[in-house]
Image (spheres, helix red, strand yellow):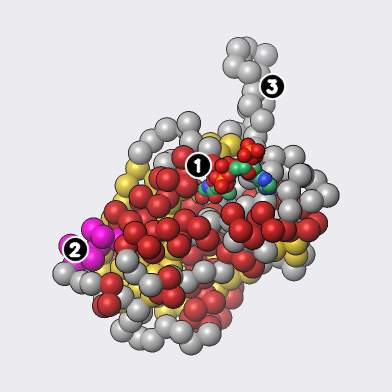
Amino acid sequence: MSFSIIGTGMYVPPKIVTNDELCKFVDTSDEWIRQRVGVERRHICTDETATDLACKAAINALENCGCAPGELDLIIAATVSGDMASPSVSCMVQRRIGAECFAFDINAACAAFVFMLDTAAGFFKRGRVKKALIVGAEQMSKIVNWEDRGTCVIFGDGAGAAVLEAGDGYVDSVLTTKGGDEVIRIPHFIGKSPFSTIRPQEPYIFMEGQETFKYAVNAMCSDIRKLLEDNNLTADDIALIVPHQANKRIIDLAAARLKIPTEKFYVNIQEYGNTSSASIPIALDELNRSGRLKRGDLIVLTAFGGGLSNASCIIKW
Ligand code: COA
């Protein structure tokens, strides 16, 4: 017994920042960002925090399937841009939505949504839970250096959520980690210990763009190949691939290498940028509400990011 996704939800802050507006902060252009990344605009927090986004997406997902907060047995959340180290985002969501179940966060950066699903699958398998809420929420605008054109043009804020119920909708997964901080890192604020001899690093996203790009394409290709092979499936059996939205060119290149038509890959990066752990659940919610997902469809979710980690899975809708 695993789970099926019975509800999805999302929330993005109303403030939209266009590529042209970014030209006020950094030496860039709308044309460069569209061509090299695929982003046209992103939603950015003004008076809301990652916790606020998480709660709104969670309520949206619960309403989508008519699930009351009291029915939940588990909440898992993920963020790299939360308000506090403790309490975790999941604990704040539990309180604000009025749930009573246990709750904890995981940290797997942009690959977190699949790591959360896989973690939840274990609880379902052991019969510990019957309904679970999974939330990815990010206020990336808080942790990007708005003077670094290599990163600030890429990211956006938002949250996505899914409600899971015991079922047979989680088919298979592949999780990979290649630990190290050379390619992507987000240092914590270090504080002011009078005893520390470590020089504080700026608490902003650092990313080697090209190394990340190569890792992402290779990870997506090897994950998708493995999932198809291990499950005796071909790309024709898959209704849709929902990739982490980091760069449109990453998706196009992976599609070309896999010889899978790009139309099979869902893309919404133009509207939100890279919202890290929120990117796949936001995409799932858009697909769900637009009626593009049919019960029984096989869907591949594929994600990669800081860690470095990559994680992909097949779900049956
Ligand atoms: N606007 C205009 N020019 C820019 C720019 C921007 N926002 N950012 C970089 N450039 C410039 C560089 O300075 C460089 O100029 P130069 O040739 O004069 O030195 C040129 O563009 C090419 O830089 P490069 O780093 O090779 O660009 P790129 O094509 O690799 O694109 C990224 C940069 C970051 C968009 C791309 O590498 C990428 O998307 N990487 C993956 C990021 C990712 O997936 N992150 C999330 C992981 S979860």
Q: In which quarter of the image is residue 43?
A: bottom right
**Magenta residues?**
224-231
Q: Name the residue under label 2.
A: 229
The amino acid pointed to by label 1 is Gln
Q: Residue furthest right?
A: 24
Query: Magenta span has 143?
Result: no
Q: Check if mark 2's residue and mark 3's residue have beta carbons within 8 Å.
A: no
Circle 3 SS class? loop
Q: Can residue 3 be seen here? A: no
The numbered mark, 2 or 3, whose residue comes first in the sequence reads 3
The residue under the point 69% across, 43% down is 149
Which is the main secondary structure of the residues drawn in magenta?
A: helix
- Quadrant of the displayed image that contains ligand 1: top right
Q: Name the residue under label 3.
A: 192
Against 152, residue 261 (above or below) is below
Q: Check if mark 1's residue and mark 3's residue have beta carbons within 8 Å.
A: no
- The answer for how far apart the CA atoms under marks 1 and 3 are is 34 Å
Task: Looking at the picture, tell me which residue is in the foreground, 23 or 239.
Answer: 23
Viewer-nearest of labels 1 and 2?
A: 1
Q: How crowded is mark 2: few (under 14 residues within 10 Å), some or many (20 or more)?
A: few
Q: Name the residue under label 1.
A: 210
Residue 121's spot in the image, x, y percent?
Answer: 31, 63
The residue under the point 52% across, 61% down is 248
Q: Which quarter of the image is occupied by the N terminus?
A: bottom left
In the image, the residue with mark 1 has its CB under 8 Å from the nearest atom of ligand 1: yes
Q: Can residue 194 be seen here? A: yes
Q: Check if mark 1's residue and mark 2's residue have beta carbons within 8 Å.
A: no
